[in-house]
Image (cartoon, grey):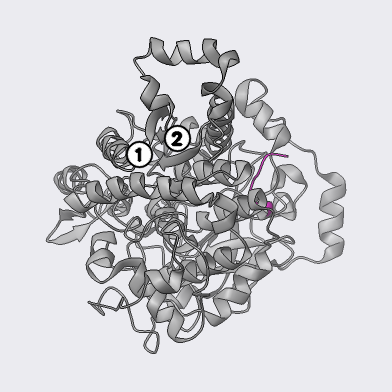
């Protein structure tokens, strides 16, 4: 079998290359085997990645058992929770592109035969997948697994509850002792935060799209089954290399639509829209926002995991995990069972015999939480190219809402107004100049949404932004407004007191101002100076596309 690594290990002219491998202690026998990159985002600053050294070790063991030579390669990773609420969040989404480019760089520079990608958190997962698809090499994702739920006030909780507790504390609803109790109880150990936030959304969707083994999305980080999964991932990559099954053989139109169906059924993070668009772009698959709504219209929502409900990823795992969800969707013909996966088997073969073990965590297809999916795309004069809402986390009374615009040009301005009690029932908070270009970096607005929820305003106040939201956000949180303010979007023209009308079932969002008035405002509009003029973020702002295209680099 001709291997990519032959370019660095075979022939007399590669003696210098081999000598450098020998300098690291590799043997002649190891260099005669396929070289498999184990791309690990292990670090001591991300709780979801703190244990990835152990996961990577298990992957390496699996590779060796199956006759390959593992090669450990590091990757960066941002903890969105630690980066939240300050300038650090500007770097989070941008890091996805750095991760993608760096994985490509290391793989191509060293001519690796296959990749086991070991991520866990928000941008690391899609960044690594984008690279695998871009290069079209044999690849498999083996994530670190979800954190177990914490405990606070007699119930199971996760990080979203703590962000909301801050709002409750600011509003005088709880005292400092209660806040500390939540702070010390919400995150009990390593893993990706326990709810259906962005990290777990993408880990589940990697399983749904076929690039990860069954169980990847839901087996807890601390379970011995996670270590077993990692060893099996190491074995599986060898089979993929042997059979020359590459990333684009798995990620294509068919599998992306399968992932979209699971996205709707699970009630995934709104960030999944950005990342699926970006992955599709690398795969050469045409995907636009219209398909999200078409899928949402026919795929019911089967799960209400935190922040939409009280259950967590560990509960989803015990209820049968992603295979059980896929089996329910298959009953109505909502997924394609013929799609190939990294098991070298089809989706249909993988989920044979799967079933729901707990209807409290996964509803049957005939008894869903709602007949429509968890994500909805809205259009209107505020978002001519679309915007995104996690419909499954919106209170029924907020599916239709009309209220006065409260306009802020940054997250900091908005959160200050919320904490000081200046936002009242009925308001529509507008946060602009936080898009991919305007931020730059498209910050998550978890602090504002959590403050509103903690102050019991999530059922009376909507929030609209050209930034984005954490998967931990709930309420009428409408993000990804495109075009963004910094790119000439109408969100820049909204004025304090304008009436905004939101109709999520009808997929519409409008400011009740005439086209003539908007045209006059545009004539008088003066764009603000860029917030950042140097460094990586300044370069990113010049090259990044709009959110409706996945905020990809052009």
Closest to the observer, 24 or 190: 24
In the image, which residues are magenta? 549-554
Image point 34% across, 40% down: which residue? 63
Q: Is residue 337 above or below residue 126?
A: below
Closest to the observer, 65 or 519: 65
Q: Dot 2: what SS?
A: loop
Residue 530 lies in what quarter of the image?
top right
Neighbours of disc 2 within 10 Å: few (<14), some (14-19), many (20+): many
Tell me if residue 550 is in the magenta stretch: yes
Residue 524 lies in what quarter of the image?
top right
Residue 352, x across and y down, in percent? 35, 76
Q: CA distance from mark 1 to mark 2?
A: 8 Å
Closest to the observer, 175 or 35: 35
Residue sitting at the far left:
154
Task: Evaluate whether residue 303 shows in this view.
Answer: no
Which residue bears the numbered disc 2? 34
Q: Are marks 1 and 2 in contact (CB under 8 Å)?
A: yes
Residue 205, x across and y down, in percent? 45, 59
Residue 153, x across and y down, in percent? 14, 58
- What label sits on residue 67 in the rendered view? 1
- What label sits on residue 419 in the rendered view? none
Q: Dot 1: what SS?
A: loop
Q: Is residue 133 above or below residue 11?
A: below
Tell me if 177 is positioned left or right of 380 in this view.
left
Q: Is residue 309 above or below residue 505?
A: above
Tell me if 189 is positioned left or right of 163 in this view.
left
Residue 188, x across and y down, in percent? 18, 45
Image point 37% across, 54% down: which residue? 200
Neighbours of disc 1 within 10 Å: few (<14), some (14-19), many (20+): some
């Amino acid at each position: 079998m001709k291997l990519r690594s032959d370019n660095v290990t075979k022939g007399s002219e590669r003696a210098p290359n081999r000598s450098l491998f020998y300098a690291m202690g590799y043997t002649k026998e190891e260099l005669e085997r396929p070289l498999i990159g184990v791309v690990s985002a292990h670090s001591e600053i991300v709780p979801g990645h703190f244990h990835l050294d152990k996961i990577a070790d298990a992957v390496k063991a699996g590779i060796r058992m199956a006759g390959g030579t593992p090669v450990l390669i590091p990757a960066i990773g941002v903890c969105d929770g630690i980066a939240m609420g300050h300038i650090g969040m500007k770097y989070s989404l941008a890091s996805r592109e750095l991760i993608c480019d760096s994985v490509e760089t290391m793989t191509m520079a060293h001519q690796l035969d296959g990749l086991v990608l070991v991520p866990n958190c928000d941008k690391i997962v899609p960044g690594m997948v984008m690279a695998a698809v871009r290069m079209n090499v044999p690849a498999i994702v083996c994530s670190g697994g979800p954190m177990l739920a914490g405990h606070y006030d007699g119930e199971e909780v996760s990080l979203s509850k703590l962000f909301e507790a801050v709002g409750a504390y600011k509003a005088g609803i709880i005292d400092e002792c209660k806040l500390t109790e939540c702070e010390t109880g919400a995150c009990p150990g390593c893993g990706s935060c326990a709810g259906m936030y962005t990290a777990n959304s993408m880990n589940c969707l990697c399983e749904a799209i076929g690039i990860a083994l069954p169980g990847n999305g839901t087996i807890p980080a601390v379970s011995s089954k996670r270590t077993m999964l990692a060893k099996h991932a190491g074995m599986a990559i060898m089979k993929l290399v042997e059979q020359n099954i590459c990333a684009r053989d798995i990620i294509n139109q068919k599998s992306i639509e399968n992932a979209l169906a699971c996205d709707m059924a699970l009630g995934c993070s709104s960030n999944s829209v950005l990342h699926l668009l970006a992955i599709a772009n690398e795969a050469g698959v045409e995907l636009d926002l219209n398909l999200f709504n078409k899928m949402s219209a026919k795929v019911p929502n089967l799960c209400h995991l935190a922040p939409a409900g009280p259950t967590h990823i560990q509960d989803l795992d015990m209820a049968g995990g992603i295979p059980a969800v896929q089996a329910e969707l298959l009953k109505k013909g909502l997924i394609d069972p013929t799609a190939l996966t990294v098991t070298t088997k089809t989706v249909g073969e993988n989920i044979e015999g799967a079933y729901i073990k707990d209807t409290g965590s996964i509803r049957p297809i005939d008894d869903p939480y709602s007949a429509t999916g968890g994500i909805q795309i809205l259009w209107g004069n505020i978002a001519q190219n679309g915007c995104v809402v996690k419909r499954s986390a919106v209170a029924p009374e907020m599916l239709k809402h009309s209220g006065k615009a409260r306009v802020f040009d940054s997250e900091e301005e908005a959160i200050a107004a919320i904490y000081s009690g200046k936002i009242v029932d009925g308001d529509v908070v507008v946060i602009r100049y936080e898009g991919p270009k305007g931020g730059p970096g498209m910050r998550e607005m978890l602090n504002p949404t959590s403050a509103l929820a903690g102050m019991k305003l999530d059922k009376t106040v909507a929030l609209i932004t050209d930034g984005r939201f954490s998967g931990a956000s709930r309420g009428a949180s409408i993000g990804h407004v495109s075009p963004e303010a910094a790119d000439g979007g109408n969100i820049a023209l909204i004025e304090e007191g304008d009436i905004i009308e939101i109709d999520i079932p009808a997929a519409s969002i409008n400011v009740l101002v005439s086209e003539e008035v908007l045209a006059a405002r545009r004539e008088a509009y003066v764009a603000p100076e860029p917030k950042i003029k140097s460094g990586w973020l300044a370069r990113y702002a010049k090259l990044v596309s709009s959110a409706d295209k996945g905020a990809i680099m052009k």
